[in-house]
Structures are given as C-alpha cells and as structure tokens.
Image (cartoon, grey):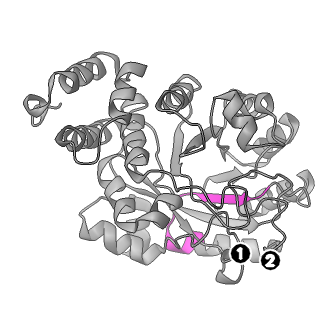
Amino acid sequence: MFESIYNKLNTKGKKLLDYFTENKTLNKEFILYILGLEKDDPQRNLLYKASSIVKENFTANYVSIKGLIEFSNYCSKNCYYCGIRRDNKTLKRYRMTEEDILEAVEKVKKLGLDTIILQSGEDYFYDDDKIIALIKKIKKLTKLPISISIGERDFESYFKYKKAGAIRTLLKHETVNRELFEKVNPDKKYEKRLGLLKYANSIGYVTGSGFIIGLPGQTNSDIADDLLFIRDEKVIMIGIGPLIASKNTPYENMENGSITKTLNACCAARFVVPNSQMPVTTALGTLDIKTHYDALEYFCNVVMVNITPDKFRKNYNIYDNKAKIDFFETIDELEKREIKICPITTKALGR
C-alpha cells in the first residue's frame, strides 16, 4: 500500500507503517511521534502522504458535503473558550423559527448535500416536543439523514430523537483528561458527557465526537489519549480543531491553537481510525483557509457547509471572524485540486 513512499521514511516512520499494516490502527507511541513532528520536517510530509493513501484505501475516497443549520445561539453553559457562552452579554441572541429551519432544509436538499446537521447551543427552549416535531417534519420533506448537535440532554431525550428519525449525533467530548475538562467547562459534568456519547452509540446512533487543540495545560499525551478514546468507543466521525481565542470569553487573551499540531492530530486520527468520517473544521479554515483545503487532500473527507441564513449566521459567534464555508466556493476549490466529491452532490450539480 505504501510502496511509493516507504523507502523515503526514517526507521521510526517505517516501523509506524509496519505497525499500521499489521494492526490497522496505531498505538500511543506512534501517535505521539506524529504529534511531535515539526512543520519543516520532511518526515511529516511523507506521513501526510501515507495518511492520504490510508484514506484512499479505507474510505469511499470522496468528500462528503453536509449542510449545517445553526438554529439557535442561546446556551445554558459557560465554557471558557466559547463565544456563545451564557455570560457573554454582548452577543445578539437568536432562535430560528420552525419555518426558517425548514426553508434551510429545502436549500440543503436542493444543493444535493448528503446530511442535515441541526446545531445549537444548549437551548432548552427547544424542548423534547419541539425537537421531535422538527425532526418528523424534516423527515417528511426529505430522506436525507438527520444529525443533531445540541449538547447534553437526558439519555431518554436522545432515545426519543432517535425514534423520531435522527440517526446521527455530534457531541464533542473535548478532552478525556478529567482535570482539564473541568477547568475548561465549569458547569459540565465529565461523567455525563462521556456517558452520553457511549449511550448514543449503544442505541444505534452514528456518533461523532472530537476535541480542541491548544487548551491551556493540554499535552501531546492528552491528545493521544483522546484519539485512543475515540477509537475504543467506536466513534465514526472525528472533529479536531484549534482553539481560537475569542473576545468576551475568559480565554480571549490566549494564543490560538497550533495549526501544525491540529494537522498532525488529523493525520494521526486517519491512521488510528482509518475508516472514519473526518470533517475539516471551520476553526481550521478560520485560521488558514488554504490549510483547510490541504487537510481535505491528506486526511479529512467531510465539509460542513453553513446553510444558516446570513441574518442569523453572523451571530453564531463561537469564535471571532468565523470563516463562512460557502458551498460553491468549496466545490470550485475541490475541483481545482481534483478532489472527488460525493456522487449525490455532483448529480445535483449536473456534473
């Protein structure tokens, strides 16, 4: 599989590929090796190419484009890094009506996107009855899979959403380091977060999770443990993005997370869970749009296009200057780089 690059690698790199070839994953030692590679290290570029070979051989080898609808920026939580945190009094809050949401769903369908993602802060205005009714109405409009990304709800609630027709859920665990988790999220419960992710998996959701690169006190060992947790919990979708220091948060004066380390973590993730769906995160595109597309060449295979109407989207400000991932710009760039696109989307485009 790696014949074109194997002999160019150093001894450690060769051992890494040998281990992967035999085990179809990596152990912590090799994950740490990838995480520690410097930007100008030739071995890094070779392992990125190896990662792209893994993607070609273990996935459908095209970019899946999903439609993201951010239907509320109200949030009951107070995470230190997040711009829509409860105590940010400068943010203009909004809630999309059911009519607004269904109009956005129609746009997702028209563009030929392959999944609808309903995302919000932890906003309990949308109680179980409202969420269930919304899922059922979307199901009447389209056969597209529905993914929910609405934070922590009761186990019973997630069971009801699944029964109503949601088949995917995105719930970032953020970090498996309990001490770090509790420092970053003062009002989230570590056991509930991880327990909810495990429960969603157990009742048949296609689960997505992920973590942030650059949290204060985070080590490469923490990141490696995050990847091993994702593998062991059989998470299918992996989102990895850099911390972005945002105004009106306790972390507003921190340095942004490292782009190099974020890419290294994505590279390692492709080896650790070779068949995973891996979105290129908007956070990465916000710091460097070129790198956003580079990630799609090597290891990522999902783009989340923002379908939220502009009058709402500008206030879903989880971090400053958030990139708008535009559908047609994305298509143009993928075609320019000769990256294959999901057949559902190309058919809708008439290509």
Q: Secondary structure at mark 2?
A: loop
Q: Which of the 4 quarters of the picture holds residue 312? A: bottom right
In percent of width and height, residue 2 lies at 16, 32
Q: Height in image: 13 above or below 100? A: above
Can you give x and y, in whole percent of width and height, for residue 268 in the image?
38, 35
**First reached walking from the N terminus: tag 2 or tag 1:** 2
Outermost residue toward the bottom in this view: 311
Instruction: Give the magenta part as a residue range.
Output: 108-121
Identify residue for label 1.
315
**Marker disc for residue 132:** none
Q: Is residue 115 magenta?
A: yes
Residue at point 37% right, 42% down? 264
The x and y percentages for residue 52 are 27, 43
The residue labelled by disc 2 is 92
Q: Write the residue at 52% across / 51% down.
A: 241
Q: Which of these two is toward me, 309 or 281?
A: 281
Q: Is residue 341 visible?
A: no
Q: Where is residue 50 shown, x and y percent of the image?
A: 23, 37
